[in-house]
Amino acid sequence: MTAPGRAVLLANLMLCLRRSEWILTVYFAYVAFLAQVLPVPKPIPVLAPTLNATVIGGFLLLAWAESLRGRELFRVLRDWYPAPLMLLAYREIGWLAPPRHTYRFEHSWVLWDKRLLNDWGLRAIIESLGPLLPAVLELAYLLVYTTPLFCVAMLYVYRRRERVDRFLTLFLVAILSSYALFPYFPSEPPRRVFPGQDFPNVETLFRRLNWELLEGQGIRTSVFPSAHVAGGFAAAFGMMRLLERRWVGRFLLVLAVLIATAVVYGRYHYAVDALAGLGAALWAWGATALWERRPASSRA
């Protein structure tokens, strides 16, 4: 195939990408760019663009395979391919962590937490029933990693698979917007910056699991906005919009509120992180709603 022919083929394949695939493509291109301009360890400026080009190539390959064969298998693969890439998106933004933190944001943010937890009595209210509510909150925080898989599965179960891309678009806009802001708000969680301060008085199994998970998989780029909160509310908003089975959206909305409470109570995030995460979910909900109202002929 000639060079012009390859260019035409590539352009056609790009036009075949789903909205969610476009969002991931833009995000991974953005991270590859930041890896060239931020002070990161030596392998990252080469690793990020190489790996991300491979990921984007996967989108193009699946789009080409579906257009060529039109088989159901490739459609299903495209539904689920973004799921592991969400974890990769998180890990990659962790590569861009600054060499050191000044903690200027954290010392300001923690003042609001002290007022919320101590002066307004949020911690006492949560612990008033013993370990029950703390365990529920920590379990909700742990379940956030499963929410996109649960939502896609529900769309399959209730025969609304054609809406998977719409859900993934909203969800990805919320969490990737949060990740994209991390380099501009370098910060670390209160459990690291203020060890022992304002910690829960109740220890639960789920809390130990969360701490072990974060010690092994956490990143040190930023905690603002909270992608946990953004993802929790985005999942709820997405299911409330796309699925007629109301119990799914309501369940996820309750879960999102629990997650937002857990991140502050458990000292995983500051309260401002949780509010910003909710803002990211609302932004994603509004932006995707506006996009869907546009005439099909005018959509990018």
Image: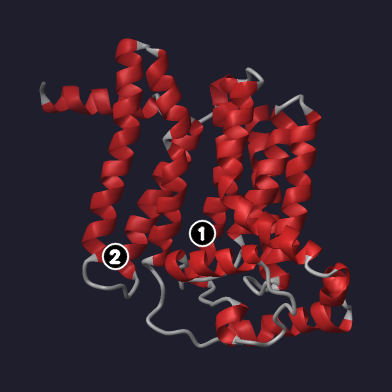
Q: Quadrant of residue 200?
A: bottom right
Q: Residue furthest left?
A: 2
CA gap, disc 2 and disc 1: 17 Å
147 w.r.t. 208: above or below: above
Secondary structure state at the residue bearing disc 2: helix
Horizontal arrangement in the rendering, residue 264 relative to residue 20 (left or right): right
Q: Quadrant of residue 59?
A: top left
* Label ID, residue 127: none
What's the amino acid at mark 1? Tyr
Q: Nearer the viewer, mark 2 or mark 1?
A: 1
The residue at which mark 2 appears reads as 36
What residue appears at the point 43 percent right and 67 percent down from the top-left corner? 216
Secondary structure state at the residue bearing disc 1: helix
| Residue situated in front as seen by the camera: 290 or 179 | 179
| Residue situated in front as seen by the camera: 73 or 94 | 73
What residue appears at the point 37 percent right and 81 percent down from the top-left corner? 99
201 w.r.t. 176: above or below: below
What's the amino acid at mark 2? Gln
| Residue situated in front as seen by the camera: 33 or 161 | 161
Residue 275 seen in this snapshot: no
Q: Position of residue 166 (x, y in %)?
A: 59, 31
Residue 48 seen in this snapshot: yes
What residue appears at the point 26 percent right and 43 percent down from the top-left corner? 54
Q: Quadrant of residue 235?
A: top right
Q: Do residues under tags 2 and 1 come within 8 Å of each other at their CB atoms?
A: no
142 w.r.t. 152: above or below: below
Q: Residues within 10 Å of mark 2 (few under 14, many from 20)?
A: some
Quarter in which the N terminus is drawn: top left
Q: Residues within 10 Å of mark 1 (few under 14, many from 20)?
A: many
Q: Position of residue 147 (x, y in %)?
A: 61, 44
Q: How is the image coloured?
A: secondary structure
The residue at which mark 1 appears reads as 179
